[in-house]
Amino acid sequence: MIRWDVNPEILSLGPIHIRWYGLLFATAFIVGFQIMTKIFKQEHKNLDDLNDLVWYMILGTVIGARLGHTLFYNPEYYLSHPIEILKIWKGGLASHGAAIGILIAVYLYSKKKKDQPFLWTMDRVVITVALGGAFIRTGNLFNSEIIGKPTDVPWAFIFVRAHVANPLVPRHPTQIYEALAYLISFFILYHIYKKNKGKLVDGYLFGLFLVLVFGFRFFVEFFKEVQEPFEKGLALDMGQLLSIPLVLAGIYLLIRAKKNLPSKKTGNKHG
């Protein structure tokens, strides 16, 4: 058993509190920007466009994640106290909401960039999103949140600082499960991109991302504690219900890509 009693704060200076979660969240964007810079240079895209894309991504991720948490997990409270929606520092971000926010942000971005269609852009963005997910779940670990159900496996964690009835019960470290899964997804996506650059049908990597990330998300939810009381009465929790349509969308994109495979003469085929 591993006793996890890490302070989520790195340091505190008066009203300023620097937390591991915030640092890892910011690191996800910084590393993602470096990867996208390399991709844009290799594909001879305007780096000024990348600066625009980053802002679209930041706004889409933060707004989507926050609204997703408030509307998916506790709509009655937040609709009755709308000002609380703005208090992001109190916690409450949903990855499914972030996914929807990113989709909308990239769609709006692509509408202004004729040489960067929606699916073309998503194929490249999801590479960094998978890696970002690994950083963010590591941040959840430092916060001792999104913990797993009780278990007696040898790698179980005792989350001393978790806000549960009995924090001394060994539990599945589901944050680590997800972080590793997303990291593996990143390597798979990036490897396929590098190996087949210019040969893949637009939407293939996006579809593979949806199947890998949200397919695993559906699976790992069986080992998690529910995030809200109302989920206890559901056959599938909210994370699983929200993952199903995304996995189905990924399967559709993969089938679509297979049907539209380019010939050697035509090269890359935009969707």
Image (cartoon, helix red, strand yellow):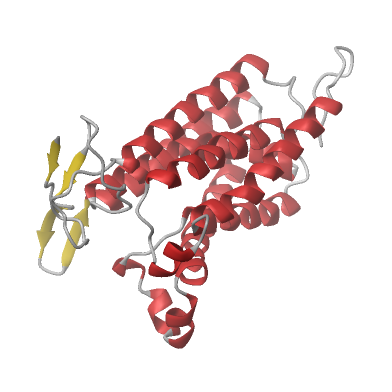
Nearest the eye: 37 or 182: 182
In x, y percent, where is residue 220? 44, 41
In x, y percent, where is residue 232? 42, 63
Nearest the eye: 7 or 232: 232
| Rendered view: 86 above or below 250 | below
Q: Tell me: 45 left or right of 33.
A: right
In x, y percent, where is residue 255? 78, 32
| Residue pictured at 74% horizontal, 37% vertical | 253
User: Which residue reaches farthest bottom?
Assistant: 80
Q: Quadrant of the N terminus?
A: top left
Q: Tell me: 123 left or right of 219.
A: right
| Residue pictured at 70% horizontal, 44% vertical | 249
Q: Quadrant of the C terminus?
A: top right
Nearest the eye: 199 or 74: 74
| Residue pictured at 52% horizontal, 48% vertical | 54
In x, y percent, where is residue 209? 59, 35
Q: Do we see residue 223 in this rendering?
A: yes
| Rendered view: 159 above or below 178 | below
